[in-house]
Image (cartoon, rainbow, N blue to C red):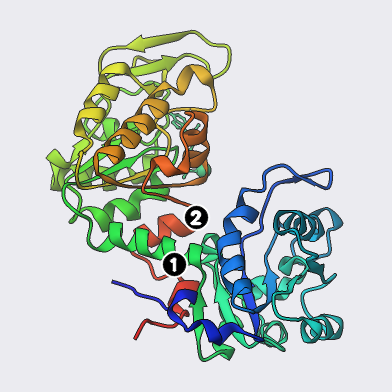
Amino acid sequence: MISKLSIRDLEDVTYRGRVVFVRVDFNVPIKDGRITDDTRIRAALPTINYLRERGARLVLASHLGRPKGKVVPELSLKPVAERLSELLGIDVKFASDCVGEEVDRMKEELRDGDILVLENLRFHAEEKKNDPEFARALANGIDIYVNDAFGTAHRAHASTYGMAVHFDIRLAGLLMAREIEALSKVRENPDKPFVVVLGGAKVADKIEIIQNLMPKAEKFLIGGGMAYTFLKALGHKIGNSLLDEEHLNLVKGFMDESPDKFLLPIDHIATDKLEGGEVKELSERDIPDGWMGVDIGPKTIGLYRKALPEKGTIFWNGPMGVFEIEQFSRGTVEVAKAIAQVTQKGAYSVTGGGDTVSAIHKAGLKNSDFSHVSTGGGATLEFLAGKELPAIAVLSDKN
Ligand code: ADP
Ligand code: MG
């Protein structure tokens, strides 16, 4: 079980008067200079407040969007610094770059409890290249390194990896610590029964998760576009449904190895055209030519609901259908609700993925309806696939 040192593990006095760098995830959606969803900024507040209350001088750094190593004014973190000022009711300082003499001076001028937000790290191509000079410049004038950005933990960038090695102690922020705890529980010692619910479009994205969790999971409930590759592997007709030809044999192999582990849709919602086509409910596994499966049907919803344990562990990633279209969202919404219900009864539920989280909210559910909602996309999938994430590996071990 990986166990990393977090900001809570050091004594309170450690932080007073020290310049603490926190790699945060302020990658928020911005339209016309306005933040359209500040969830990620709010999510960072517990770590920020924890450190401020203990007298730290905070330097916050993040990427925003994909500026590709150039200054893109629309992707400035200035509006984020302003939003943070409003949320905290203090004057948050903003540096118009993330490295350099001016930034170093601003770091030196910080007082206990002050916050300095740096400009978008990815305005420098060196960030993603993990350039050693750039990493050193980021580390300038910093006493303590903290990473609270789980979403980029699968990347060895200057701010997530390169600069960390300049410090003897490298800490997880509160969000990062919670991600590590929840996801390692699922990956390493899930309470039984352990059920994995997988959907979404691409088999390729989830193959390694299946491989890694196969020995531990009792059941895999497969839905979404990926289900059709599984059905095809069993010899069913899938019409025009999504098919991942390339992974067909691998999928066959999974089911030959553990035929009882996989639950597949027994009925479908199908259409002849994704938008504006005819829609029908197919009460059998096979899908006729000219039709594509776009959601699991009502019998499958019932089957999957029954397969969810009231005690034990559930991991869910990937919508059960094309949930973006109302007509095809029922399977995803019902499965989300069913997972929330068993969570209330005592199951430990972890879910993650960009589309999965938006589907959860679309279903009218809150993050608190699940034991843990992971903020990572690729990072969450890689973690559960059993990979070592460089930004986590570089953090100090407990003990
Ligand atoms: P996440 O972002 O949560 O990891 P994915 O990106 O893997 O999820 O999958 C989400 C996408 O899968 C959505 O865009 C959804 O429309 C698509 N999808 C789900 N079911 C189907 C289906 N039956 N056919 C085509 N696309 C599907
Ligand atoms: Mg997605």
Residue 75 % position (x, y): 79, 56
Please tell me whether mark 1 or mark 2 is closer to you in this view: 1
Q: Where is the C terminus found, in terms of image quarters?
A: bottom left
The reply to whether residue 105 is in sight is yes
Please name the residue shown 25% across and 63% down the image: 188
Is the residue marked by circle 2 packed among few (<14), some (14-19), or many (20+) residues within 10 Å? many
- What whole-number distance in Å separates the C-alpha atoms at marks 1 and 2? 13 Å
> Residue 226, which numbered label?
none
Which one is nearer the viewer's eye here, 18 or 261?
A: 18
Is residue 390 among what the camera can see? no
Residue behind label 2 places its C-beta within 8 angstroms of ligand 1: no
How packed mark 1 is, by other alpha carbons closer than 10 Å (few <14, some 14-19, many 20 or more), is many
Q: What's the amino acid at mark 1?
A: Ala
Q: In the displayed structure, does residue 399 sit left or right of residue 127?
A: left
- Residues 10 and 23: in front is 10
The quadrant in which residue 87 appears is bottom right
Q: Is residue 83 above or below residue 131?
A: above
- Compare residues 175 and 69 and report the one nearer the observer: 175
Placement of 103 over or under 67, stated as above or below:
below
- Quadrant location of residue 212? bottom left
Lower position in the chain sequence, tag 1 or tag 2:
1
x, y percentage for residue 101? 85, 86
- The residue lying at 76 percent from left, 59 percent from top is 85
Q: Give the residue number, with chain letter if any, for mark 2.
A: 376
Return the residue at label 1: 177
Instruction: Kindly state the secondary structure of the residue where label 1 is placed.
Output: helix
